[in-house]
Image (cartoon, rainbow, N blue to C red):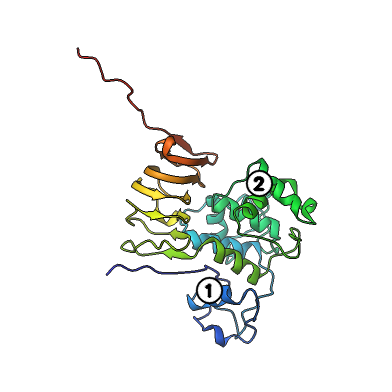
Amino acid sequence: MKKFLALVLVFVLSLGTVAFAADFKDMPDDWSTSALEAAVANGLLGGNGGYIYPSDNMTRAEMATIMVRACGAIDEANISGYTDVKPEDWFYASMAKAVAMGAFTGSDNKLNPESPITRQEAFLVLSRVFGLYADKDDLKAIDAFKDGEKVAEWAKEGVAAIISSGYVAGADGYLNPLNNISRAEFAVVMDRLVKYYIDDAAAEIPTDGNVMIRVPGVALDKLETSNVVILGDGMGKEDITIADANMTGKLVVRAGKKVSVSGNLGGVSIAASGITLEGDPHKIKHIHVCKGSTFSAPLIMLTEPSEK
């Protein structure tokens, strides 16, 4: 029997045992409750000592771990050149994978793993991982916030992409880009970004929410959906073919070496390097390819070859 596994959030900040939402003494009753409860119900937010700490700031290392697990990333970059990470650190492997993913780059030879991550930093990371990009009109969306001028120049495209995609709306007209992001806030954003995680190659692809696929071999031919489908790193480096699809949402590609698509697609975003996308540009409404990857349209023969 085909099945799908709905994992609303990869939010692992401890190695505690699986708990139920009711077990947490500090589970809030507010705008973040459903996202936090979903994370707990899926066994991905374990908390510690009976507390879930929804208001605690998230560190860069914790977010790196979440991104790695969310996408099923395996490859590790050489991060020995960074001066603030050591092989014995609990987050070393996660940081190495996050760098390989292109999620984190650091600065001044530092990754600052134990520093709290700000909202604009988190939004920039999410835009990289989920292939979200902003055009000139999208950048204007930042100006609609009372504190839009506080968004750093280097973060504007990522922040604008998150806003224009509808994943972040701010509060009371403020975006608070320089504030640290809390566990609860991040749970809500991730809940909007991804509803289902697929870890079974025989799974059916749900069509009522955004989907992250983290294993190879999932059947994608003739898929019909208006939501976002993400080919996560866990699908590996093998070639991927999607035939006769009707995807009016967006396909985000982080896996594969050559990805061939046919059918009607609302958009395709290549969000990782080393990937070649092949498809008919007339059948894809929007195409965005990140640095290090390429798009190749098939050769269309316009006339019959002459006889020799």
Q: In which quarter of the image is residue 282?
A: top left
**Residue at image point 48% right, 41% down:** 285
**In the drawing, what numbered circle is on residue 138?**
2
Q: Which of marks 1 and 2 is nearer the N terminus?
A: 1
From the viewer's side, name the closer residue of 293 and 5.
Answer: 5
Question: Is residue 253 shown to the viewer in this render?
Answer: no
Is label 1 or label 2 in front?
2
Q: In which quarter of the image is residue 115?
A: bottom right
- Residue 47, relative to residue 261: is it above or below? below
Compared across the picture, whether 64 is left or right of 200 comes to right
Three-letter residue code for mark 1: Ala
Q: Which residue is the site of mark 1? A: 39
Measured from the top left, where is residue 235 in percent x and y? 40, 54
Residue at image location 35% in from the left, 27% down from the top: 300
Residue 256 position, x and y percent, is: 40, 47
Q: In which quarter of the image is the N terminus?
A: bottom left
Quick one: which residue is furthest to the left in this view? 308
Residue 286 visible in rendering: yes
Residue 204: x percent and y percent? 34, 63
Picture quadrant of residue 30: bottom right
| Dot 1 crowding, Cα within 10 Å, few <14, some 14–19, many 20+ | many
The secondary structure type at the circle numbered 2 is helix
